[in-house]
Amino acid sequence: MKKAKPMDAVLILLFVLVSLVPLTGLLPRPAQSAQIVRVTTPEGTEEYALDDHTIALDSHGYHLTLAVSADGVQVTSSDCPDHTCMKTGKITRAGNAIVCVPAHVRVDLVGGEGYDGIAG
Amino acid sequence: MGSRVRWMIGTALFCVLASGLSYLEFLLPINAAVPIPGFKLGLSNAIVLFLLHRDRRQAFAVLLGKTALTALLFGGATSFVFSLCGALLSFFGMLALDFLLAEHITDLSLSCAGGVLHNLGQLCAAIAFMGGKALLPYATPLMLAGLCCGAVIGLFLNTFSERMNGVLAKLRF
C-alpha cells in the first residue's frame, strides 16, 4: 500500500484552484432585462418576442416544445434521452441559456440595451 | 504464446474490463444523486491509470478501445467525440505529470488530475460544439466532481495496485 505524499496535497489544492477559475467568468455580468428569445438549431437562428406563445421545434430527429411568456422561456416537452433541457427549468435573465445537446438546440435570452443604472 | 499475442489479449481483456465498469456506471442512477449534466464516476480510468505504470502503450490502446466501445454500446457520435476529447486530455495530462513528478506523487494526485482534465476536455469539446459561454456555469461543479471521483479512484489504486500487480504476475500478464 502506497501512502500519499506531500506533493499530492499540493497538486490537489492546485486542481481545486484551477476548478474555481471558470467562476470568475461568471461574476462581472450586469443584470439585463431579457427582451428576445433566440433559438439556435443546425438549420439556423430564429428570434422571437417575449410574449405568451409556444414554439414547436424539430431538430436532429428530436421534437421540443418551448413555452415563451413575458418573463422568460422554458422547454416544456422534449423526447431527447436525458431531458437536461427540461430540467433547466425557466430562464428569465438575459445571458441565460437552455441547451439540449442531443437535439443540437440552444435557446438564449437576449437583453436589450438595458443598464442597471447610469451614474452622473 | 508469443509476447505480442499476450499483449493483444491483455489489451482486449482490459478494454472489456474498462467498458464493463463504464456499463456499471451507466446502470447506477448517479445523475439522481449528483444532478450535473455529463457527470460520470470515471471508474474505467482506474484501469487506464493502473496500466500507465505497467505499459504506457497498452494504457493508451485501452483508453482508445474503451472509449470507442463505450460510445458504440451506450452512446453515439456526439458522446464519442466528447469522451475522446476528455480521455485524450486526461491521458496526456496524467502521462506528463507521471513523467515530471513520478518520484514525488502517487496515484492519488494522478487520478485527480485525470478526473479534472477529463471533464475539462469534455467541456471544451461541448463549448466548441455548442459555442458561447452557456456551458461555463457547469465547469466548476464538473471539475470539482471529477476531482472527488479521481481522489476515490486514486486512493483505491494506492491501496490495491500492488496486489493487482501480484495477481497479474501470477497469471503471467
Image: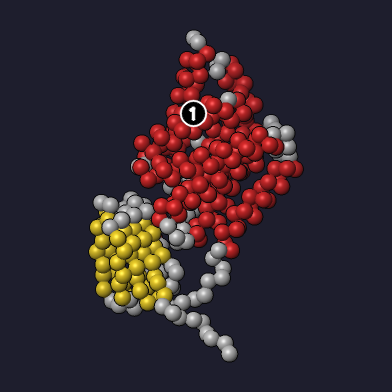
Which residue is at 58% across, 33% downward? B49
Q: Is residue B10 above or below residue B127?
A: above
Q: Is residue B116 visible?
A: yes
Q: Secondary structure at mark 1?
A: helix
Which residue is at 69% across, 34% downward? B102
Q: Is residue A56 above or below residue B78?
A: below
Q: Amino acid at mark 1?
A: Ala
- The foreground one among B95 and A79 is B95
Q: Quadrant of residue A59?
A: bottom left
Tell me: A69 left or right of B106. Answer: left
Q: Quadrant of residue A55?
A: bottom left
Chain letter for the residue marked with disc 1 in the picture: B
The residue labelled by disc 1 is: B61
Q: Is residue B18 visible?
A: no
Please state the horizontal and vertical placement of residue B27, each as a whole percent of the image: 41, 41
Which residue is at 73% across, 37% downward? B104
Q: Which of the image's four quarters has the C terminus of chain B?
A: top right
Tell me: A118 left or right of A112. Answer: right
- The foreground one among B159 and A95 is A95
Tell me: A65 left or right of A14. Answer: left
Please state the horizontal and vertical placement of residue B115, each as a whole percent of the image: 56, 44
